[in-house]
Amino acid sequence: MLWHLEIRPAPGRPDLAGLRLAHEAADIGIAGPWHLAVSRGFLIEGPLGRDAVDRAARQVLVDPVVEAYAIHPGGDGQGGDRHGNGSGGAVVHVLPKAGVTDPEAESALGLLRDLGYEVVEVRTIRTYHIDGPAEERRRLIDRLLANEAVEQVIVGPLPFDHLGQGHDYDFRLVTIPIRSMDDRGLVEASRAGQLSLSLAEMKAIQAHFTALGRDPTDCELETLAQTWSEHCSHKTLKGRIEFEGRTIDNLLKQTIFEATRSLDLDWLVSVFSDNAGVVRFDDEFDVCFKVETHNHPSAIDPYGGSNTGIGGVIRDALGTGLGSRPICNTDVFCVAPTDMPPEQIPAGVLHPRRVLKGVVAGVRDYGNRMGIPTVNGALAVDPGYLANPLVFCGTVGVIPRGMAFKKVEPGDRIIAIGGRTGRDGIHGATFSSLELTSESESISGGAVQIGNAITEKMVQDVVIQARDRGLFHAITDCGAGGFSSAVGEMGEKLGAAVDLERAPLKYRGLSYTEIWISEAQERMVLAVPPESWPELRRLCEAEHVEATDLGEFVPTGRLTLRYHGEVVADLSMEFLHDGRPAVVRSATFTPMPAVPLEAPIKADYTGDLMALLGHWDVCSKEWIVRQYDHEVQGRTVVKPLVGIHDDGPGDASVILPVRGSNRGLAVSCGINPRYGRLDPYAMAACVIDEAIRNCVAVGADPGRIALLDNFCWGSTDRPETLGSLVLAARACHDLSLAYRAPFISGKDSLNNEYSHDGKSLAIPPTLLISAIGQVPDVRRCVTMDLKEPGNVLVIVGTTLDELGGSLWAHTLGMEGGAVPGVDPEAGAAIFRAIHEAICRGLIRSCHDLSEGGLAVALAEMAIAGGLGASASLRDVPCDDSAAKDGVLLFSESPSRFLLEVRPADYDALAALLGVIPMGRLGEVRGAAPGESPRLSIAGLDRIPVVDAPVPDLKDAWQRTLKW
Amino acid sequence: MSTPRAIVLRAPGTNCDEETVAAWQLAGADVETWHVGRLLEEPAGLDRFQILTIPGGFSYGDDLGAGRILATRLGHALGDSLHRFRDRGGLIAGICNGFQVLVRCGLLPGGAGEGRATLTNNDSGRFEARWVRLVPSPGLSPFIAFREPIELPVAHGEGKFLMADDAAVDGLDARGQIVLKYADDRGIPTRDYPDNPNGSAGAAAAVCDPTGRIFGLMPHPERHVRAIDHPRWTRHVGDLPKEGQGLQIFRGAVDALR
């Protein structure tokens, strides 16, 4: 028997979900008016009667204080107009597609069974009772109510009377007759199998198997495709590149790794070798940091994509060394303008507003449930991200010293712990290495996974305890490629034998290959000495975590997979890991022709400042930040939101990795796609400078800042695109050396393009730099909000005429100009001096100058502090060519800071800064009696060029994202 | 003086156990963390403790409603033990998800004829993290033994305290069981967002049972045990306070048991 338990707000209680959806529909231009009544509910299958369902509803499934419910027999043909309001509206049911993870249903099933109910299967369901124009209903469903990549939509009565439980799988060994294929056949086999292997790679595989005298199984070919994918092997950046008449053998090795290697710093522990980079923190602990992208899945299902993005990077931290404890998360989103008219959105692409809401909710629900504070992030908005939104998620972990390394021993058991294996995310690794097309949404639905954060939290609880008891030799996460990459990587130096039928499955019917490459979430693989396995199993039982012995690491040099005793794959580890032909690509770069930018001369720039404050890149992100728990674990001592009303934009958050110690960790980032379009080298240099200066601004020691790179580029098959990446990588090398800030980990995501109607839309070259900086004593930290009237405002650093790619130029539609260049020698001296001044307690507040330059920085400090300020541009240290009001206000020259200093400390600060360019700009002002505080900036001729009440500035800054 | 012994109960999805343990230690208690599975196996283990805490998090993912599954499991197997624990003078505190658990298993507001309460979706319709100002009503509960308003963070999506009708909430208030109220910057209890972050009836942020010994609150006192936990400590002029305001709640319980 199948029952539908439909749960509604009790009479007299508002239907908040319905009201919100009607509002959203209006926002994204789906003509209404709509009246939407939303029910949650469950489909419950089992030999139980209506009275039992009624009891279960009252006992655990419904909140009787605020909810009412109805019980419908499934398949009764009803459901058209159950509430009998006779409106003739439609009823739409939305439920997860078969095989899609449904955590709440799993919980309901478990609890109902524990309570003695005879339940076989449960699925969650949402039901919408819709009144509104029938011709717009489909658009409403597609754009707002359901995501058909993962959900099934039923309009009208539910047409089934039981829930499918899948079919048994009949074993049949599949081989691919690769030996007899010509080139066209090889290309077609790669395409049809969604393998993303190039012809050269297919030929290498063909030659290998021809030499062996047999054809590969499907499972062997899939394993090679996963391991050789761009996602897993980074073959472009590690491949050979012909550039400007010279050959680069391995771009990453020659730029980013090379800088770290030659810096040879004694506080680096493990770099570029594990899931995350590890640095020394104090005498007892190391910290690790990893930032991942999850772009393509987020384009198709923003919620599921970012949800599993954060889940995946948390597992990276958990699988670093012998396991680190995650202590904070970061997130950065790049999307198209969210006010884009719906008719401009191409087929197969989700509206940017929906993308942003979805990705925020995905990170929120996973991070909050895991109990990891999300403390830092950014939002970059550019039309180039329309079809390829970018989602970056990062995790910092803390790990006891001496536990940063792992080594699999022969005879170790291969133990999988955590979630069960399903069809989720089949072909995720190869899919993420492909271009998206308008069909991607339909063909790649399987590539989208849904996470279950609590399963991962339980896995974390087990891993940390097992680590401390020494129960395993090695650990890694199941990420892209699933068991295939986890076991393949762990067994690389040794060999592994796996019995695939042992893997616990979510449902019946998975083939051996599906089990092997599934990207089902929340799974980790451990190498466990046989004598420790019983204790680990008991630990897992006590924590209600499933653990399974899948096989053994064996010193054969081979990866052998069996299914009920039949060998379904037998590959040499050497061929798997070293057999891929090197990728050879050519790169070119033609700098943009220098076009001077003539900045307009105005008498008053207040309106320009207002526009900048309201721009996406600058505006208040409070709507996002407040949805994240940024204080769970009780470590966050400088919050992402600072100031007198807890709503100012902090430069970096500071956390305490070790309870009881005052040594802190500052977490920050830098990103700027506008510069990327114009000058990739300058862009990379600027975002490195920005990430470092954000860290320094709160109190981090510039001598202890570690960096991460995330390159997101368009198709590197185009030499121009690859050329811009080469230049950005070179800037990483140069700036890392100059600032003595090592890169410790990184990740790239290439092919962020979308083809539609024969045209290709690529993202702007986007480099995210994430930084962790160490703070000797957090009690010296400073925030950016103005503190007390009468204090002195000081600008540090030189302003040049660098408006190319600036936000001011962008908002005015001005082209050309020079992208800011970094002078690392000057920058390094400034960073050291600022840090020294903070340590000596000379600075009351400190803010870095970035998008929107001096004017925006000063306005933000005033907004956050609820105080006014008066300043003069005559006191800004600048180059002669920059001596214009507009340039001084809005130029984005790097390595600059604005400081608030007590008058009594000014001389000490000036002495400390010495020859570093600085200017005594003005002072902090309170409000005149009965008035609001004002921000007033005098121009070079002493007449105010900006003058506005601070509340007006704040309103402009907050309005954009007040959702 | 003996040192009170506290047990912090951990379930799948609990995630504030460590900082809650740290807060009890700072307040002077001896603390152990137990997985709920262990307590279900040996309910007599409770006898060794005087304070039981159910910390924040998302027990069992908050599937089926915040705290619902843990409440059902606890109520099913341990309902009587928990009542006995209170009746012999033990103190029970539920923080955030723990408060939701205590409400859902009927221990709060507790007492005969109190009527049922719930903690439901915030009026804002979403999870929010922010700091709030709270005015105490000391007298009934040992956890609230201070008179000055305090500031603590909230971080929840389902924190709106409601009873079947507002008269029931008034009754609760009249009996002194609403022991912390969300207040505006003048210290006046309020139902207005954002000072009241969820729209709770009676501005209720913390509620106790008629004995005062069972206590639950949505804000997180364990996240304000040091002065530098406060979001505006960098604005402070002069020496920082010695400790965070949330620690008073833990100290109150420890002092009452000494």
Image: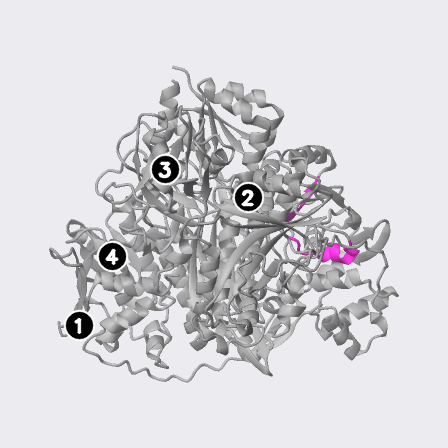
The quadrant in which the C terminus of chain A is found is bottom left
Q: First in sequence: mark 2 or mark 4?
A: 2
Q: Which residue is mark 3?
A: B167
Q: Is residue B122 left or right of residue A229?
A: left
Q: Nearer the viewer, mark 2 or mark 4?
A: 2
Q: Is residue A422 visible?
A: yes
Above-or-below relation of A77 to A191: above
Q: Which residues are magenta?
A: A509-528
Q: Circle 4: is it few (<14), some (14-19), or many (20+) Cα within 10 Å?
A: many
Q: Which residue is mark 1?
A: A939
Q: Amino acid at mark 4?
A: Leu
Disc 2: which residue: A62
Residue A13 spot, x, y in % from top left: 44, 50
Earlier residue among tags 1 and 4: 4
State whether discs 3 and 2 lie on one chain: no
- Judge from the rendering whether residue A449 lies leftward or rightward of residue A854; answer left or right: right
Q: Nearer the viewer, residue B230 or A875?
A: B230
